[in-house]
Image (cartoon, rainbow, N blue to C red):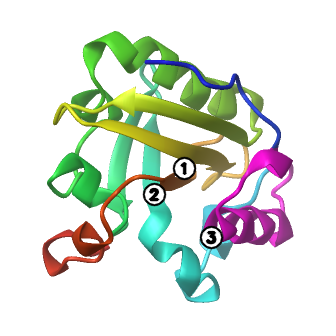
Amino acid sequence: MRRENSRSSLTDISSPALVELVRYWQSLDPAPAIPHRQYFNPVDVPQCLRHIVLMDVHETKPRYYIRLAGSAVNPVYQKSIAGCYLEDIVREEDLADVLSDYDHAVANQVPVFRLNSSRFINGKMRAYERVILPMTSNGITADKLLVGINFFNVAPHLMDRPTFKL
């Protein structure tokens, strides 16, 4: 994985949908440090839905289970990634770097933003920006993640295909 930037400030986000997603996440009532998952309502951010990935954090290791992925995310993987673990969709040589961002967000209960480019499992190079927003279902640990991803160089005709809808 080629690191264009290290972890960046949330003010570096360029995608309007991801900016809106972060604002929305920040507006949710923290319980006590990060928002409770029950307060996230997708109806409140319809313009963001195609960029969202919802994940469960399984305690062992931890592992990141993808519950839902938006229609701007799935085409990059050429399949629906819902029901997969993060390590199943990231190339082996990139896994440690990718997991470090997720692990940091969970362990520190803070958002993590990354601007990057990477070769995906399908072999294509993609530039993207990603924000990982931790949430809680138990009021204590970051056991849910609201992830926003914007890919910069995906052909518009691939987006929002019915096969890949959220």
Secondary structure state at the residue bearing disc 2: strand
Tell me, for residue 17, which label it has, or none.
3
Magenta span main SS:
helix
Disc 3: CA contacts within 10 A as few (<14), some (14-19) or many (>=20): many
Q: Is residue 139 left or right of residue 50?
A: right
Disc 1 residue type (three-letter) = Lys
Secondary structure state at the residue bearing disc 3: helix
Q: Is residue 163 left or right of residue 107?
A: left
Label 1, label 3: how far apart the Cα atoms are: 20 Å
* Region of the chain picked out in magenta, as a range: 10-33
**Residue at coordinates 79% horizontally, 46% vertically from top-left?**
12
x and y, in percent, of residue 152 in the image: 47, 53
Q: Nearer the viewer, mark 3 or mark 2?
A: 3
Disc 3 residue type (three-letter) = Ala
Say if mark 1 contacts mark 2, CB within 8 Å: yes
User: Residue under circle 2?
Assistant: 54
Disc 2 residue type (three-letter) = Leu
Q: Nearest the camera: 107 or 146?
A: 146
Q: Is residue 24 shown in magenta?
A: yes
